Image (spheres, grey):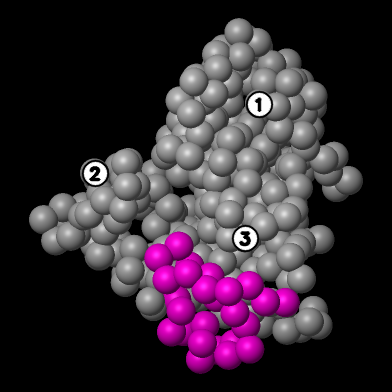
Amino acid sequence: MTPAELDLRQYAVLGLVEEASRLALGYFGRKDSLGVSMKGAQDWLTVADGAVEAFLRERLAVLFPGDAVIGEEGGGEAADAVWIIDPIDGTSNFARGDRTWCISIGLLLNGVPEIGIISAPALGEVYLGRRGRGATMNGEPIKVSGTADIRRAYLEFGWSTRIPNEDYLATVGRGFAAGASVKRSGSGALGLCHVAIGRTEAYAELHINAWDVAAGLVIATEAGADINDFFAGGAIKAGNPVLCCTPELTGELERITGIVSRHNSR
């Protein structure tokens, strides 16, 4: 795919995400009309998830009919060029009126994250990453914090029902024992963005799905974060662990999480 073709996709999808954000905001806070259901324990679903994903799928099919699409709600199959969508990441927050949620869409080319766009409309933030071209929030360049002392670090550890609670709690315990502050906010995509912009020093999760990270990994990498090789193996379908952190703390976070990262050459 040529740089011009990638430019077209970047600017077109930024526009689509802006429209999708308005659609999602129309649902946000209207608890009585969200049609909340549960796909599993703490796995929330609202009518907004389906509406936003359907909108993005329809528009992408018209604009880029040769590109494949995988969505959290509608599934799909990978291809050389594939968009991976999480229509509402942080659905439990969304359903409860908490503003910590976002729309996440990332483009992979031959298995490599190329473009990442994440919009958190209730927070007024839009993140963009393009491989080799840096990362921005609302058009301004962003970078990781550079914090080198774990005792000054703020870590976020995502939780998954696919992992025993004992393993998650042990990871959190090692973070506290190292002297860090630890939190969980309920959106993996925004967790990666918060590392990218320097609000936290790390985001890690022992199992996470591709649609939660496809966009955020581009953004975080371009902001200077170290990440693990998430898309190795069958991660698009089955998920993988994720570790994203400011490079100065990579060794500490590998020890705390047990996830091996790779150094960012940026």
Q: Nearer the viewer, residue 241 or 217?
A: 241
Which quarter of the figure has residue 37?
bottom left
Q: Residue at x 76, y 71 (%)?
A: 110
Q: Residue furthest left?
A: 32
- Crowd around label 2: few <14 · some 14–19 · many ≥20 (10 Å): few
Give the CA distance from mark 1 to mark 3: 22 Å
Residue 243: give its label: none
Q: Secondary structure at mark 2?
A: helix
Q: Which residue is mark 2?
A: 96
The amino acid type found where label 3 is placed reads Ile
Which residue is label 1 attached to? Answer: 257
Task: Specify which label sits upstream in the sequence, 1 or 2.
Answer: 2
Above or below residue 237? Residue 225 is above
Q: Which residue is mark 3?
A: 236
- In the rendered image of this protein, does residue 22 appear above or below residue 170? below
Name the kind of residue labelled 1 in the image: Thr
The kind of secondary structure element at disc 1 is helix
Q: Which residues are magenta?
A: 56-80
Q: Using the numbered discs, state the Cα–Cα distance from disc 1 to disc 2 in whole angstroms.
A: 30 Å
